[in-house]
Amino acid sequence: MSNTSPFENKSFLQLFIAQIIALVGTGLSTIALALLAYDFALNEAGRVLGIALAIKMIAYVVFAPIIGGFVHRIPRKFFLILMDILRAIVVLTIPFISEVWHIYVLIFVLNLFSAGFKPVFQALIPDILTDENQYGKALAYSRVAYDLENILSPTLAAIALLFFSYTGLFIINSAAFMVSALIIFITLLPKDRVIERAGSIIDEMSFGIISYLKTPRLRALFILYFGIALASSMIIVNTVIYVKDYLYLSDTTVAIFIGASGLGSMLVAFLYPYINEKIIDKYITQIGVLVLSVSLFFMSYEPIYSFALITWFLTGVGLSLSQVPSGKIVNMSSSPPDRTSYFTAQFSLSHLSWFFGYLLAGELVYMFGFSFTASLFSMVVLVCLLFSLLFWPKEKISNEMLHTHERLVHEHTHTHDDGHHIHEHTASEDEHSHDHEHSEITHEHRFFIDIHHQSWPK
């Protein structure tokens, strides 16, 4: 495996820069949205933001699979540029709203386009970085970028607000999306692959989710993500409550606690390529979830500043350990033509976990207190880990599986390079569609759920 940096690949470097610019712009808009909500709702601003966050999750969970069902019909570069331009237009209209419900509508539309952009962008990276070691480093760097944005955006927003109102932050975000679109336009991307898919548009929309849930390791990953979401939600939703209502400290301390979690996450992201040389992704993910269960248990202790700060740092470590490898796990579970559908399913299902995580973290702490909720979440995360230990199959180095195909007659666009479409054809017919028959066959190769493999071998 190559030890070179993924940044030596010009296409990845350009896309990474586009990601950073879009992330910073989005972070500034998040701050601006909070200020806008306060202008409209005053003491109900938190409620407005909570509803907006739930709407964001609904857009991700419901519409990402729908978009994933037809996005393979559109060139990826054109689609990504279109999503960036549409997001830029939506963000630019936010300062002109006059009612609270306008916020909800625009947030939904904005995140509808994000639900289209993000999974396609994520699925594109392993097509550019075909070396697994480079791809692993790329995932780690993306995690660092995400954490840095969370930490630095409030600072950048504070500096920007010295010179203009929060309306200017939306304009900066719109410009960031346009710059991202321009960078993607000038980036050389791999040729789009022919997607072998049969059935109606409903079948195509459900293909990613169904295939994802039919894959044993991905089912286990989904269950783990529910535990990950609970731990993450405790940090995102309840840090301010813990610091102000239990430690009786200031807003500055809230930022310190969030920063401690981000620092732990970044540290692991930097170390991930070295950890992955010794430990496979399955075990890294499971160790991360174990760390989350322990850190949640520690959160239930009597509030002590120094101990709590270490616990928040430990939670960041667990969040990074458990999430950084997920891209590689999804990638190894899908064939290149179907990769976007699998990443869309991962995007949708993981955000479904966060949707419930946000709701549970907020409501349970309100009704039963922080200590009880942290203890309960610790046990639930442990159950999620136990599920993965029992039902995540033992990984083989080759991932090749012996399996048998029943006789099948169907039609779909196909090529002849995968061992499933061997028949006479001319060079001009390399990508074509017609009724064809698959005879019963037993063979061995890397196994994915796709149009020719509808169930996992027993």
Image (cartoon, helix red, strand yellow):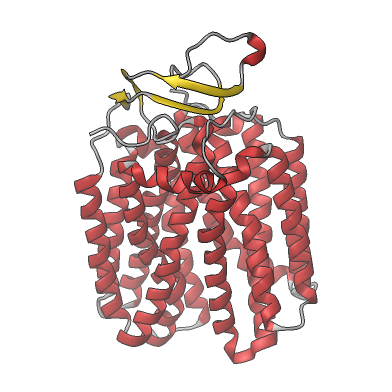
Point out residue 390 in the picture as x, y percentages from the top left corner: 19, 47
Give the residue at x 42% y 37%.
273
Residue 55 left/right relative to 305: right
Q: Nearer the viewer, residue 453 or 1?
A: 453
State the quadrant of the C terminus: top left
How far across and how far down the image is residue 49, in percent?
A: 58, 77
292 left or right of 141 in image:
left
Classify 147 as above or below 248. Answer: above
Q: Residue at x 33, y 66 (%)?
A: 311
Residue 284 lies in what quarter of the image? top left
Q: Nearer the viewer, residue 243 or 446?
A: 446
Q: Quadrant of the N terminus?
A: top left
Q: How many marks?
A: 0
Question: 412 left or right of 290?
Answer: right
Q: Residue at horizontal 73%, vertical 41%?
A: 78
Residue at the spot 67% in from the left edge and 80% down from the top edge:
101
In the figure, 430 relative to 81: above or below?
above
Please name whichever residue, 391 or 67, is drawn nearer the observer in this view of the structure: 67
Query: On screen, 104 above or below 400?
Result: below
Question: Vertically, is 122 above or below 134?
Answer: below
Q: Quadrant of residue 398?
A: top left
Looking at the image, can residue 23 be seen?
Answer: yes
Q: Position of residue 30 (x, y in %)?
A: 63, 69
Q: Specify whether residue 172 is in view.
A: no
* Relative horizontal placement of residue 265, taking residue 155 as reference (left or right): left
